Image (cartoon, rainbow, N blue to C red):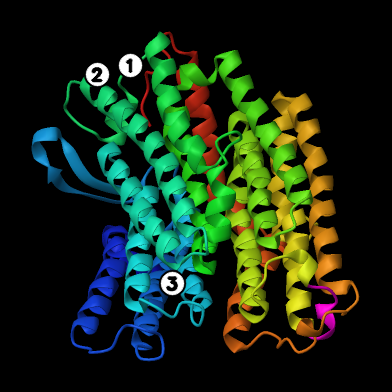
Amino acid sequence: MRDFLISMDYSSWVLPALLLIPLIGAAVLLLVGLFRDDDGTLDRDPSARSIAFWTLLIEFVVSAGLWWSFDAAEPGWQARFSSTWIIPWGARFSLGIDGISLFMILLTTLIMPLAVLGSWTSVRTKVRSYYALLLVLTTGMLGVFMALDLLLFYVMWEVMLVPMYFIIGVWGGERRIYASVKFFIYTMIGSLLMLVGILYLWNAGGQVSFDYDTILNVPVTGRAALFLFGAFFLAFAVKVPMFPFHTWLPDAHVEAPTAGSVILAGIMLKMGTYGFLRFALPLFPGAIVTPWVRDGVLALSVIGIVYGALVAMVQPDFKKLVAYSSVSHLGFVMLGIFALTVNSVQGALMVMINHGISTGALFFLVGMIYERRHSRLIADYGGIAKVMPMFAALLTLVALSSIGLPGTNGFIGEFLVLIGAFETHPVFATVSATAVIFAAVYLLWSLQRILFNSLDKPANEHLKDLNWREVTIMGTLTVVILWLGLYPAPVLRRMQTSAEHFVHSVETRAALPNARLGGR
Protein backbone atom coordinates (compact mmCIF):
# COMPACT_ATOMS: atom_id res chain seq x y z
CA MET A 1 0.00 0.00 0.00
CA ARG A 2 2.81 2.42 0.92
CA ASP A 3 4.67 1.71 -2.36
CA PHE A 4 1.48 2.25 -4.34
CA LEU A 5 0.86 5.63 -2.69
CA ILE A 6 4.42 6.76 -3.29
CA SER A 7 4.33 5.67 -6.93
CA MET A 8 1.17 7.73 -7.44
CA ASP A 9 2.88 10.75 -5.83
CA TYR A 10 0.08 10.80 -3.31
CA SER A 11 1.81 13.28 -1.00
CA SER A 12 1.92 16.00 -3.66
CA TRP A 13 -1.85 16.34 -3.99
CA VAL A 14 -3.49 14.84 -0.91
CA LEU A 15 -3.62 17.96 1.31
CA PRO A 16 -5.20 20.36 -1.21
CA ALA A 17 -7.54 17.54 -2.24
CA LEU A 18 -8.71 17.13 1.36
CA LEU A 19 -9.58 20.84 1.45
CA LEU A 20 -11.31 20.75 -1.93
CA ILE A 21 -13.44 17.58 -1.63
CA PRO A 22 -15.84 18.97 1.06
CA LEU A 23 -16.26 22.21 -0.88
CA ILE A 24 -17.14 20.27 -4.02
CA GLY A 25 -19.63 18.25 -1.97
CA ALA A 26 -21.19 21.44 -0.59
CA ALA A 27 -21.48 22.92 -4.09
CA VAL A 28 -23.10 19.73 -5.45
CA LEU A 29 -25.49 19.63 -2.53
CA LEU A 30 -26.60 23.22 -3.06
CA LEU A 31 -26.81 22.85 -6.85
CA VAL A 32 -29.05 19.81 -6.46
CA GLY A 33 -31.30 21.98 -4.30
CA LEU A 34 -31.67 24.58 -7.06
CA PHE A 35 -33.42 22.03 -9.25
CA ARG A 36 -35.81 20.79 -6.57
CA ASP A 37 -39.13 22.35 -5.68
CA ASP A 38 -39.35 21.11 -2.10
CA ASP A 39 -38.85 23.03 1.10
CA GLY A 40 -35.67 21.21 2.11
CA THR A 41 -37.17 19.02 4.80
CA LEU A 42 -35.72 15.59 5.49
CA ASP A 43 -38.71 13.64 4.20
CA ARG A 44 -38.68 15.37 0.84
CA ASP A 45 -34.92 15.66 0.36
CA PRO A 46 -33.11 12.53 1.54
CA SER A 47 -30.39 13.18 -1.06
CA ALA A 48 -28.85 15.96 1.05
CA ARG A 49 -27.69 13.68 3.84
CA SER A 50 -26.52 11.03 1.35
CA ILE A 51 -24.41 13.53 -0.60
CA ALA A 52 -22.84 14.80 2.62
CA PHE A 53 -22.16 11.30 3.95
CA TRP A 54 -20.56 9.94 0.78
CA THR A 55 -18.50 13.09 0.33
CA LEU A 56 -17.10 12.81 3.84
CA LEU A 57 -16.60 9.06 3.50
CA ILE A 58 -14.51 9.70 0.38
CA GLU A 59 -12.66 12.34 2.38
CA PHE A 60 -11.82 9.77 5.06
CA VAL A 61 -10.64 7.20 2.52
CA VAL A 62 -8.37 9.76 0.84
CA SER A 63 -6.94 10.89 4.19
CA ALA A 64 -6.35 7.33 5.37
CA GLY A 65 -3.43 7.08 2.97
CA LEU A 66 -1.53 9.52 5.16
CA TRP A 67 -1.20 6.74 7.73
CA TRP A 68 0.91 4.67 5.33
CA SER A 69 2.68 7.44 3.45
CA PHE A 70 3.84 9.23 6.62
CA ASP A 71 7.52 8.73 7.51
CA ALA A 72 7.65 8.36 11.30
CA ALA A 73 11.42 9.00 11.40
CA GLU A 74 11.18 12.40 9.68
CA PRO A 75 10.67 15.39 12.03
CA GLY A 76 10.17 17.92 9.23
CA TRP A 77 7.15 18.79 7.12
CA GLN A 78 5.72 16.11 4.89
CA ALA A 79 3.16 16.11 2.05
CA ARG A 80 4.17 19.72 1.36
CA PHE A 81 2.12 21.83 -1.00
CA SER A 82 2.83 25.47 -1.73
CA SER A 83 1.34 27.87 -4.24
CA THR A 84 1.24 31.64 -4.71
CA TRP A 85 -1.66 33.35 -3.01
CA ILE A 86 -1.41 37.06 -2.09
CA ILE A 87 1.87 38.05 -3.73
CA PRO A 88 2.19 41.68 -2.47
CA TRP A 89 1.98 40.49 1.14
CA GLY A 90 4.21 37.46 0.70
CA ALA A 91 1.35 35.15 1.70
CA ARG A 92 1.33 31.69 0.16
CA PHE A 93 -1.16 28.84 0.10
CA SER A 94 1.26 26.61 1.99
CA LEU A 95 0.27 23.27 3.52
CA GLY A 96 2.13 20.49 5.32
CA ILE A 97 1.89 17.98 8.15
CA ASP A 98 4.07 16.41 10.81
CA GLY A 99 3.45 13.82 13.53
CA ILE A 100 1.35 16.34 15.46
CA SER A 101 -1.05 17.46 12.73
CA LEU A 102 -1.30 14.01 11.13
CA PHE A 103 -3.56 12.65 13.85
CA MET A 104 -5.69 15.78 14.05
CA ILE A 105 -6.44 15.38 10.34
CA LEU A 106 -7.27 11.69 10.69
CA LEU A 107 -9.43 12.41 13.74
CA THR A 108 -11.35 15.06 11.79
CA THR A 109 -11.98 12.89 8.75
CA LEU A 110 -13.11 10.00 10.99
CA ILE A 111 -15.53 12.06 13.08
CA MET A 112 -17.21 14.01 10.27
CA PRO A 113 -18.97 11.15 8.39
CA LEU A 114 -20.10 9.80 11.76
CA ALA A 115 -21.49 13.26 12.55
CA VAL A 116 -23.60 13.05 9.40
CA LEU A 117 -24.94 9.66 10.47
CA GLY A 118 -25.66 11.14 13.91
CA SER A 119 -27.80 13.84 12.26
CA TRP A 120 -29.67 11.40 10.02
CA THR A 121 -33.07 11.74 11.68
CA SER A 122 -32.60 14.55 14.19
CA VAL A 123 -32.17 17.37 11.64
CA ARG A 124 -35.43 17.77 9.75
CA THR A 125 -35.49 21.39 8.57
CA LYS A 126 -33.20 23.33 6.22
CA VAL A 127 -31.41 20.05 5.59
CA ARG A 128 -29.34 21.12 2.58
CA SER A 129 -28.05 24.20 4.38
CA TYR A 130 -27.16 22.16 7.44
CA TYR A 131 -25.10 19.60 5.57
CA ALA A 132 -23.49 22.24 3.37
CA LEU A 133 -22.32 24.00 6.52
CA LEU A 134 -20.91 20.73 7.86
CA LEU A 135 -18.90 20.31 4.67
CA VAL A 136 -17.56 23.88 4.71
CA LEU A 137 -16.73 23.42 8.40
CA THR A 138 -14.68 20.34 7.49
CA THR A 139 -12.53 22.37 5.10
CA GLY A 140 -11.98 25.08 7.71
CA MET A 141 -10.96 22.63 10.43
CA LEU A 142 -8.59 20.69 8.18
CA GLY A 143 -7.09 23.97 6.96
CA VAL A 144 -6.21 24.92 10.53
CA PHE A 145 -4.27 21.68 10.98
CA MET A 146 -2.50 21.93 7.61
CA ALA A 147 -1.63 25.63 7.24
CA LEU A 148 2.07 26.56 7.18
CA ASP A 149 1.35 30.21 6.44
CA LEU A 150 0.18 32.29 9.39
CA LEU A 151 -2.27 34.34 7.34
CA LEU A 152 -3.74 31.18 5.83
CA PHE A 153 -3.98 29.72 9.33
CA TYR A 154 -5.92 32.76 10.50
CA VAL A 155 -8.28 32.63 7.51
CA MET A 156 -9.03 28.95 8.13
CA TRP A 157 -9.48 29.67 11.86
CA GLU A 158 -12.20 32.18 10.99
CA VAL A 159 -13.75 30.04 8.24
CA MET A 160 -14.57 27.24 10.67
CA LEU A 161 -16.08 29.70 13.16
CA VAL A 162 -18.92 30.83 10.88
CA PRO A 163 -20.50 27.42 10.07
CA MET A 164 -20.50 26.38 13.72
CA TYR A 165 -22.16 29.68 14.67
CA PHE A 166 -25.06 28.89 12.31
CA ILE A 167 -25.21 25.20 13.24
CA ILE A 168 -25.75 26.14 16.89
CA GLY A 169 -27.91 29.19 16.19
CA VAL A 170 -30.30 27.60 13.68
CA TRP A 171 -30.51 23.94 14.67
CA GLY A 172 -29.79 24.19 18.40
CA GLY A 173 -31.99 24.08 21.47
CA GLU A 174 -34.23 26.67 23.10
CA ARG A 175 -31.35 29.03 24.09
CA ARG A 176 -29.48 28.53 20.82
CA ILE A 177 -29.21 32.23 19.93
CA TYR A 178 -27.62 33.09 23.27
CA ALA A 179 -25.23 30.14 23.04
CA SER A 180 -24.18 30.84 19.44
CA VAL A 181 -23.60 34.54 20.02
CA LYS A 182 -21.58 33.81 23.16
CA PHE A 183 -19.51 31.24 21.28
CA PHE A 184 -18.89 33.69 18.43
CA ILE A 185 -17.97 36.65 20.61
CA TYR A 186 -15.57 34.71 22.84
CA THR A 187 -13.78 33.16 19.88
CA MET A 188 -13.73 36.35 17.81
CA ILE A 189 -12.14 38.48 20.54
CA GLY A 190 -9.32 36.02 20.96
CA SER A 191 -8.92 35.68 17.19
CA LEU A 192 -8.57 39.42 16.65
CA LEU A 193 -5.80 39.66 19.23
CA MET A 194 -4.03 36.78 17.49
CA LEU A 195 -4.35 38.61 14.17
CA VAL A 196 -2.65 41.66 15.70
CA GLY A 197 0.16 39.37 16.87
CA ILE A 198 0.51 37.81 13.41
CA LEU A 199 0.69 41.24 11.76
CA TYR A 200 3.30 42.36 14.31
CA LEU A 201 5.50 39.37 13.48
CA TRP A 202 5.03 39.96 9.76
CA ASN A 203 6.03 43.61 10.14
CA ALA A 204 9.01 42.72 12.36
CA GLY A 205 10.15 40.28 9.66
CA GLY A 206 10.31 43.04 7.06
CA GLN A 207 6.81 42.46 5.63
CA VAL A 208 8.31 39.72 3.45
CA SER A 209 6.38 36.58 4.29
CA PHE A 210 3.80 34.93 6.54
CA ASP A 211 5.59 31.60 6.09
CA TYR A 212 5.77 29.62 9.33
CA ASP A 213 9.47 28.80 9.10
CA THR A 214 10.30 32.40 8.18
CA ILE A 215 8.28 33.88 11.04
CA LEU A 216 9.90 31.34 13.38
CA ASN A 217 13.24 33.11 12.83
CA VAL A 218 11.97 36.65 13.47
CA PRO A 219 13.65 37.81 16.70
CA VAL A 220 11.17 39.07 19.29
CA THR A 221 12.35 39.39 22.87
CA GLY A 222 11.51 40.92 26.24
CA ARG A 223 8.21 42.61 26.81
CA ALA A 224 7.15 42.32 23.16
CA ALA A 225 7.47 38.54 23.33
CA LEU A 226 5.35 38.44 26.49
CA PHE A 227 2.61 40.60 24.95
CA LEU A 228 2.60 38.58 21.74
CA PHE A 229 2.47 35.34 23.67
CA GLY A 230 -0.45 36.80 25.62
CA ALA A 231 -2.33 37.54 22.37
CA PHE A 232 -1.84 34.00 21.05
CA PHE A 233 -2.50 32.55 24.49
CA LEU A 234 -5.91 34.21 24.79
CA ALA A 235 -7.01 33.04 21.32
CA PHE A 236 -6.03 29.46 22.02
CA ALA A 237 -7.06 29.37 25.70
CA VAL A 238 -10.61 30.39 24.78
CA LYS A 239 -10.79 27.65 22.17
CA VAL A 240 -9.37 24.90 24.48
CA PRO A 241 -11.17 26.12 26.70
CA MET A 242 -8.98 26.72 29.74
CA PHE A 243 -10.27 27.86 33.09
CA PRO A 244 -11.46 30.67 33.45
CA PHE A 245 -12.15 31.14 29.69
CA HIS A 246 -14.45 28.12 29.55
CA THR A 247 -17.86 29.63 30.27
CA TRP A 248 -19.01 29.57 26.63
CA LEU A 249 -18.51 25.81 26.39
CA PRO A 250 -21.38 24.38 28.51
CA ASP A 251 -23.91 26.66 26.80
CA ALA A 252 -22.63 25.81 23.31
CA HIS A 253 -22.56 22.08 24.00
CA VAL A 254 -26.00 21.92 25.59
CA GLU A 255 -27.74 23.99 22.92
CA ALA A 256 -25.92 22.56 19.88
CA PRO A 257 -27.46 19.69 17.92
CA THR A 258 -25.82 16.32 18.50
CA ALA A 259 -23.41 16.60 15.58
CA GLY A 260 -22.46 20.12 16.67
CA SER A 261 -21.60 18.90 20.17
CA VAL A 262 -19.60 15.98 18.76
CA ILE A 263 -17.61 18.25 16.44
CA LEU A 264 -17.02 20.84 19.16
CA ALA A 265 -15.70 18.25 21.60
CA GLY A 266 -14.11 15.89 19.13
CA ILE A 267 -12.29 18.35 16.89
CA MET A 268 -12.71 22.07 17.52
CA LEU A 269 -11.46 22.11 21.11
CA LYS A 270 -8.26 20.48 19.83
CA MET A 271 -7.59 23.53 17.70
CA GLY A 272 -6.76 25.46 20.85
CA THR A 273 -4.27 22.89 22.12
CA TYR A 274 -2.90 22.45 18.59
CA GLY A 275 -2.37 26.21 18.45
CA PHE A 276 -0.20 26.04 21.57
CA LEU A 277 1.84 23.18 20.11
CA ARG A 278 2.25 24.70 16.67
CA PHE A 279 2.45 28.43 17.36
CA ALA A 280 2.47 29.75 20.94
CA LEU A 281 5.36 27.69 22.29
CA PRO A 282 7.61 27.52 19.19
CA LEU A 283 7.19 31.22 18.37
CA PHE A 284 7.73 32.52 21.90
CA PRO A 285 9.98 30.08 23.79
CA GLY A 286 11.43 32.91 25.88
CA ALA A 287 8.01 33.65 27.32
CA ILE A 288 7.36 29.97 27.97
CA VAL A 289 10.44 29.47 30.11
CA THR A 290 9.68 32.58 32.16
CA PRO A 291 8.85 30.94 35.52
CA TRP A 292 5.76 32.96 36.39
CA VAL A 293 4.29 32.48 32.89
CA ARG A 294 4.85 28.73 32.79
CA ASP A 295 3.78 28.16 36.39
CA GLY A 296 0.73 30.34 35.84
CA VAL A 297 -0.40 28.32 32.83
CA LEU A 298 0.27 25.04 34.65
CA ALA A 299 -1.72 26.27 37.66
CA LEU A 300 -4.68 27.21 35.45
CA SER A 301 -4.44 23.79 33.80
CA VAL A 302 -4.57 21.98 37.14
CA ILE A 303 -7.43 24.18 38.37
CA GLY A 304 -9.32 23.34 35.18
CA ILE A 305 -8.71 19.62 35.67
CA VAL A 306 -10.08 19.59 39.21
CA TYR A 307 -12.74 22.27 38.72
CA GLY A 308 -14.18 20.63 35.59
CA ALA A 309 -14.45 17.27 37.36
CA LEU A 310 -16.08 18.73 40.49
CA VAL A 311 -18.62 20.79 38.55
CA ALA A 312 -19.45 17.81 36.33
CA MET A 313 -20.18 15.83 39.49
CA VAL A 314 -23.17 18.01 40.43
CA GLN A 315 -24.77 18.47 37.00
CA PRO A 316 -28.42 17.32 36.66
CA ASP A 317 -28.15 17.54 32.85
CA PHE A 318 -26.18 14.63 31.36
CA LYS A 319 -25.08 16.65 28.33
CA LYS A 320 -23.78 19.47 30.52
CA LEU A 321 -21.98 16.88 32.66
CA VAL A 322 -20.12 15.65 29.57
CA ALA A 323 -19.38 19.27 28.58
CA TYR A 324 -17.73 20.04 31.92
CA SER A 325 -15.77 16.80 31.70
CA SER A 326 -14.15 18.30 28.58
CA VAL A 327 -12.78 21.17 30.67
CA SER A 328 -11.12 18.59 32.89
CA HIS A 329 -9.74 16.45 30.07
CA LEU A 330 -8.36 19.38 28.11
CA GLY A 331 -6.66 20.53 31.31
CA PHE A 332 -4.63 17.32 31.11
CA VAL A 333 -3.60 18.28 27.57
CA MET A 334 -2.41 21.71 28.70
CA LEU A 335 -0.54 20.17 31.63
CA GLY A 336 1.23 17.81 29.24
CA ILE A 337 2.15 20.57 26.77
CA PHE A 338 3.58 22.98 29.32
CA ALA A 339 5.37 20.29 31.35
CA LEU A 340 7.51 20.14 28.18
CA THR A 341 8.85 16.60 28.34
CA VAL A 342 8.66 14.06 25.55
CA ASN A 343 6.42 11.79 27.63
CA SER A 344 4.07 14.60 28.60
CA VAL A 345 3.81 15.96 25.05
CA GLN A 346 3.10 12.51 23.63
CA GLY A 347 0.56 12.04 26.40
CA ALA A 348 -1.05 15.37 25.55
CA LEU A 349 -1.38 14.32 21.91
CA MET A 350 -2.89 10.99 22.95
CA VAL A 351 -5.39 12.73 25.25
CA MET A 352 -6.35 15.01 22.35
CA ILE A 353 -7.10 11.98 20.18
CA ASN A 354 -8.74 9.96 22.93
CA HIS A 355 -10.91 12.79 24.17
CA GLY A 356 -12.17 13.31 20.63
CA ILE A 357 -13.15 9.65 20.40
CA SER A 358 -14.56 9.05 23.90
CA THR A 359 -16.30 12.37 24.50
CA GLY A 360 -17.58 12.38 20.93
CA ALA A 361 -19.04 8.93 21.62
CA LEU A 362 -20.66 10.18 24.83
CA PHE A 363 -22.33 13.04 22.98
CA PHE A 364 -23.56 10.62 20.31
CA LEU A 365 -25.10 8.45 23.03
CA VAL A 366 -26.69 11.46 24.72
CA GLY A 367 -28.20 12.45 21.36
CA MET A 368 -29.51 8.94 20.75
CA ILE A 369 -31.34 8.74 24.09
CA TYR A 370 -32.57 12.33 23.71
CA GLU A 371 -34.24 11.46 20.37
CA ARG A 372 -36.21 8.73 22.17
CA ARG A 373 -37.00 10.45 25.46
CA HIS A 374 -36.64 14.19 24.67
CA SER A 375 -34.91 14.82 27.98
CA ARG A 376 -31.28 15.18 29.04
CA LEU A 377 -32.01 15.20 32.77
CA ILE A 378 -30.44 12.29 34.58
CA ALA A 379 -33.38 12.16 36.99
CA ASP A 380 -35.76 11.36 34.11
CA TYR A 381 -34.10 8.02 33.52
CA GLY A 382 -33.35 4.97 35.63
CA GLY A 383 -33.10 1.26 34.90
CA ILE A 384 -33.09 1.62 31.11
CA ALA A 385 -30.45 -1.12 30.83
CA LYS A 386 -33.40 -3.50 31.09
CA VAL A 387 -35.00 -2.18 27.89
CA MET A 388 -31.87 -0.90 26.05
CA PRO A 389 -29.13 -3.44 26.81
CA MET A 390 -26.96 -2.56 23.80
CA PHE A 391 -27.13 1.16 24.63
CA ALA A 392 -26.26 0.36 28.25
CA ALA A 393 -23.26 -1.76 27.29
CA LEU A 394 -21.86 0.88 24.95
CA LEU A 395 -22.45 3.73 27.38
CA THR A 396 -20.65 1.78 30.10
CA LEU A 397 -17.66 1.05 27.85
CA VAL A 398 -17.38 4.65 26.66
CA ALA A 399 -17.71 5.98 30.22
CA LEU A 400 -14.93 3.65 31.39
CA SER A 401 -12.73 4.84 28.53
CA SER A 402 -13.40 8.45 29.54
CA ILE A 403 -12.42 7.60 33.12
CA GLY A 404 -9.17 6.11 31.84
CA LEU A 405 -9.63 2.44 32.61
CA PRO A 406 -6.54 0.41 31.58
CA GLY A 407 -7.27 -1.40 28.34
CA THR A 408 -9.23 1.53 26.94
CA ASN A 409 -7.91 4.50 25.00
CA GLY A 410 -8.26 6.95 27.91
CA PHE A 411 -5.59 5.33 30.06
CA ILE A 412 -2.43 5.69 27.99
CA GLY A 413 -2.73 9.44 27.38
CA GLU A 414 -3.39 10.48 30.97
CA PHE A 415 -0.73 8.07 32.22
CA LEU A 416 1.92 9.58 29.92
CA VAL A 417 0.90 13.13 30.86
CA LEU A 418 1.17 12.38 34.58
CA ILE A 419 4.53 10.60 34.44
CA GLY A 420 5.90 13.25 32.06
CA ALA A 421 4.66 16.12 34.21
CA PHE A 422 6.02 14.44 37.33
CA GLU A 423 9.53 14.70 35.83
CA THR A 424 9.45 18.51 35.94
CA HIS A 425 6.45 19.51 38.11
CA PRO A 426 5.66 16.75 40.62
CA VAL A 427 3.27 18.86 42.70
CA PHE A 428 1.06 19.77 39.74
CA ALA A 429 1.10 16.15 38.55
CA THR A 430 0.10 14.83 41.96
CA VAL A 431 -2.82 17.24 42.32
CA SER A 432 -3.97 16.45 38.78
CA ALA A 433 -4.03 12.73 39.53
CA THR A 434 -6.90 13.32 41.95
CA ALA A 435 -9.14 14.26 39.01
CA VAL A 436 -9.01 10.64 37.84
CA ILE A 437 -10.86 9.74 41.06
CA PHE A 438 -13.38 12.55 40.53
CA ALA A 439 -13.99 11.38 36.93
CA ALA A 440 -14.83 7.92 38.22
CA VAL A 441 -17.27 9.44 40.69
CA TYR A 442 -19.27 11.61 38.28
CA LEU A 443 -19.40 9.07 35.45
CA LEU A 444 -20.08 5.92 37.48
CA TRP A 445 -22.70 7.71 39.56
CA SER A 446 -24.37 8.86 36.35
CA LEU A 447 -24.33 5.34 34.95
CA GLN A 448 -25.98 4.04 38.09
CA ARG A 449 -28.78 6.60 37.95
CA ILE A 450 -29.40 6.27 34.20
CA LEU A 451 -28.93 2.57 33.62
CA PHE A 452 -29.11 0.55 36.82
CA ASN A 453 -31.61 2.14 39.21
CA SER A 454 -35.23 1.01 39.25
CA LEU A 455 -37.18 1.20 36.02
CA ASP A 456 -39.88 3.22 37.77
CA LYS A 457 -40.94 5.70 35.06
CA PRO A 458 -43.54 4.53 32.53
CA ALA A 459 -42.01 6.66 29.76
CA ASN A 460 -38.83 4.56 29.92
CA GLU A 461 -40.48 1.15 29.74
CA HIS A 462 -40.91 1.07 25.96
CA LEU A 463 -37.70 2.73 24.75
CA LYS A 464 -36.23 1.09 21.66
CA ASP A 465 -32.63 -0.08 21.63
CA LEU A 466 -30.07 1.18 19.11
CA ASN A 467 -30.78 0.73 15.38
CA TRP A 468 -28.29 -0.24 12.64
CA ARG A 469 -27.23 3.35 11.98
CA GLU A 470 -26.52 4.03 15.64
CA VAL A 471 -24.70 0.71 15.99
CA THR A 472 -22.52 1.66 13.01
CA ILE A 473 -21.54 4.93 14.67
CA MET A 474 -20.81 3.41 18.04
CA GLY A 475 -19.21 0.28 16.60
CA THR A 476 -16.67 2.40 14.72
CA LEU A 477 -15.78 4.41 17.82
CA THR A 478 -15.66 1.28 19.99
CA VAL A 479 -13.09 -0.31 17.68
CA VAL A 480 -10.89 2.78 18.00
CA ILE A 481 -11.35 2.88 21.79
CA LEU A 482 -10.18 -0.70 22.17
CA TRP A 483 -7.40 -0.45 19.56
CA LEU A 484 -5.81 2.60 21.16
CA GLY A 485 -6.25 1.08 24.60
CA LEU A 486 -4.73 -2.31 23.80
CA TYR A 487 -2.16 -1.46 21.13
CA PRO A 488 -1.27 2.27 20.92
CA ALA A 489 2.28 1.59 19.67
CA PRO A 490 1.67 2.49 15.98
CA VAL A 491 0.23 5.87 16.98
CA LEU A 492 2.94 6.62 19.53
CA ARG A 493 5.65 5.65 17.03
CA ARG A 494 4.34 8.07 14.40
CA MET A 495 4.17 11.00 16.82
CA GLN A 496 7.36 10.36 18.82
CA THR A 497 9.86 12.04 16.47
CA SER A 498 7.72 15.16 16.17
CA ALA A 499 7.21 15.29 19.95
CA GLU A 500 10.98 14.97 20.54
CA HIS A 501 11.66 17.66 17.94
CA PHE A 502 9.07 19.96 19.48
CA VAL A 503 10.53 19.69 23.00
CA HIS A 504 14.12 20.00 21.79
CA SER A 505 13.47 23.00 19.53
CA VAL A 506 11.54 24.95 22.17
CA GLU A 507 14.20 24.31 24.83
CA THR A 508 17.04 25.11 22.42
CA ARG A 509 15.63 28.40 21.21
CA ALA A 510 14.61 29.39 24.73
CA ALA A 511 18.25 29.01 25.83
CA LEU A 512 19.58 31.38 23.14
CA PRO A 513 20.31 35.02 24.08
CA ASN A 514 17.42 36.43 22.06
CA ALA A 515 15.22 33.38 22.78
CA ARG A 516 13.89 33.41 19.24
CA LEU A 517 16.70 32.24 16.89
CA GLY A 518 16.80 28.93 15.08
CA GLY A 519 14.43 27.44 12.54
CA ARG A 520 12.74 24.15 12.14
Quadrant of image for the C terminus: top left
Picture layout, residue 327 above or below residue 470: above
Which amino acid type is shown beneath numbered disc 3?
A: Met
Q: How far apart are marks 1 and 3 (CA)?
A: 44 Å
Q: What element carries label 2?
A: helix
Lower sequence index among marks 1 and 2: 2
Q: Which of marks 1 and 3 is in front?
A: 1
Q: What stretch is highlighted in magenta?
A: 381-388
Q: In which quarter of the image is residue 19?
A: bottom left
Lower sequence index among marks 3 and 2: 3
Q: Quick one: which residue is furthest to the front in this view?
A: 174
Picture layout, residue 30 above or below residue 323: below
Q: Nearer the viewer, mark 3 or mark 2?
A: 2
Q: Distance between the residues labelled 3 and 2?
A: 45 Å
Picture layout, residue 419 above or below residue 4: above
Q: Which residue is drawn at 42% across and 30% down?
A: 232
Q: Which mark is drawn over residue 1?
A: 3
Q: How many marks?
A: 3
Badge 3: few (under 14), some or many (20 or more) residues near its Cα, within 10 Å?
few
- Chief secondary structure of the magenta span? loop
What residue sits right under mark 2 in the picture?
Answer: 204
Position of 444 compared to 329: left or right?
A: right
What residue sits right under mark 1 in the picture?
Answer: 219
Q: Is mark 1 on a helix, strand or loop?
A: loop
Quadrant of image for the N terminus: bottom left
User: Is residue 408 in view?
Assistant: yes
